[in-house]
Image (cartoon, grey):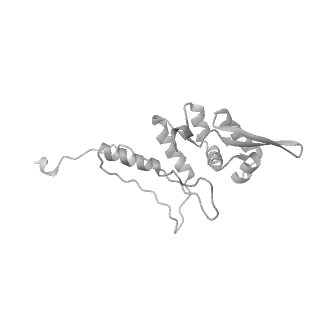
Amino acid sequence: MTDEQLLALRSSAQYKALGHPMRHRMVNLLRQRPATLGELTTALGSTKGTVGYHVRILRDAGLVRLASTRRVRGGTEQRFELVNRGFQLDEETGAMFLHDAALAEMLPTSPGDPGHTVLHHVWLTAEEARTLSERLESFDHGHQLTPEPGTEAYGLLLSLFRADIPRLPPEDAQG
């Protein structure tokens, strides 16, 4: 995903809007395709009033917009969409926000579930870290965002960061 396809989050209202679990789930639904309040209500197992409230918060924050309307049985049906395919987070807030969002999405693992969470530390040169970062960034290109029959959603939280791990002196220098 290129930077042109990402909306840079700049306000606390935008982070707050995305920080609520219901709104976060709505964004994940709208990443698949535009949807009506009724479709969102059914997918989220909620009420139309609750979904409408949360859509309004996302709209007010500039994250969701009205995609189209159509007349239905004497009323007007509204279809909503994301303003961009994704969001670019600032360096200070972004990592914690993504961490919290991933934790909120994680379902308990079941026996035989391929889910896997682990923290590894590796020692890299600056150039190796840049190369790895570029490879991680390109990983999601070409992977489907729209569910296909027989597939399930899996989250993939990738983070490459300089870790606060002190370095021991070489063994022979301890004298």
Residue at the outermost right position: 74
User: Toward the viewer: 69 or 98?
Assistant: 69
110 vs 128: above or below: below
Residue 65: % across, % down: 69, 37
Residue 91: % across, % down: 45, 36
At 71% from the left edge and 42% from the top edge, which residue is drawn? 80
At 67% from the left edge and 49% from the top edge, which residue is drawn? 33
At 31% from the left edge and 44% from the top edge, which residue is drawn? 127
Please state if 48 lies on the left or on the right of 75 as rendered: left
Residue at the outermost left position: 175
User: Toward the viewer: 129 or 50?
Assistant: 129
User: Toward the viewer: 13 or 139?
Assistant: 139
Please state if 33 lies on the left or on the right of 38 as rendered: left
Residue at the outermost bottom position: 112
133 vs 11: above or below: below
94 vs 147: above or below: above
- In the rendered picture of this protein, how many numbered marks are placed on residues? 0
Residue 140: % across, % down: 50, 51
Please state if 116 lies on the left or on the right of 173 as rendered: right
Residue 59: % across, % down: 68, 36
